[in-house]
Amino acid sequence: TVGNMNEHAVIITETTWGGLPQLEDPNGKIDYGSLIYITLQRAKTAREAIATIVELANTYGYASSGESFSIADASEAWTMELIGKGDSTNDPSRKGIVWVARQIPDGYVSAHANQARITNISKNDPTCLYSEDVISFARKEGLFEGDDKAFSFCDTYAPADFGAMRGCEARVWSFFRSVTEGMDAYIDFAMGVNPKNKMPLWVKPTEKISPKRLFDAMRDHYEGTPMDMTTDIG
């Protein structure tokens, strides 16, 4: 995980999730780390950061696999996910990214841990930003059929297998369960046995989260859960 902040208190952190391997572009010129550093040199707000990431990736080509970003300023917090369009060496139309960003509601917390998590696109909604071709590109590539309302970014571009749920989403689940109630309802998803029981993108904590609470979450080893590493390293 890489995280940085600039002099305008714009913060960007990331986790990598891979996604469909055929969407990586060997001709891309800018990777996720460069996107973070260059964007923080230019952006004064979270929304400016999202726009800058998009401009950079579409201008120079994206050289990484699927990526999630947490992007925040003093007023707003966003989660953004993106992936390339495949090899642009002989097809310039593939240069750049498809992407979506969702604003986290005030009073809620979100998390990502090396797996795409944004599902549906909310059209005509200022708290949901996305590339114009995020759905049409998926249709063109044969990755999605059906009504636009049924489109899910993560299920289309990074379908979650057992490893993604048990090794990645389980970490989100463990954080969520430490700050809010009712998360045991999703334990079968975290254990990798019920992919349809997907967790929400954000949850409302029972109380304001202190820095110490966040530090503890980052040090978590599933204590008190079926995945407790002090009782079973597997």
Image: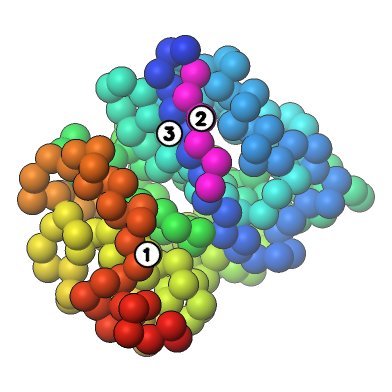
Disc 2: CA contacts within 10 A as few (<14), some (14-19) or many (>=20): some
Disc 2: which residue: 4
Assess whether residue 2 is covered by the magenta stretch.
Answer: yes
Disc 3: CA contacts within 10 A as few (<14), some (14-19) or many (>=20): many
Q: x, y (%) of residue 210?
A: 19, 39
- Over which residues does the magenta segment extend? 1-6
Can residue 189 be seen here? The reply is no
Q: Main secondary structure of the magenta part?
A: strand
- Labels 3 and 2: the sequence-earlier one: 2
Q: Which quadrant of the rendered structure holds the C terminus?
A: bottom left
Identify the disc placed on residue 171: 1
Assess whether residue 139 is covered by the magenta stretch.
Answer: no
Q: x, y (%) of residue 232?
A: 38, 86
The image shows residue 210, relative to residue 229, as above or below, that is: above
Q: Nearer the viewer, residue 218 or 185?
A: 218
Q: Quadrant of residue 8?
A: top left
Q: x, y (%) of residue 93?
A: 78, 44
Which structural element holds mark 2? Answer: strand
Left-right relation of 175 to 10: left
Which structural element holds mark 1? Answer: helix
> Residue drawn at (51%, 30%), measured in percent from left and top?
4
Q: Amino acid at mark 2?
A: Asn
> Residue drawn at (22%, 47%), measured in percent from left and top?
213
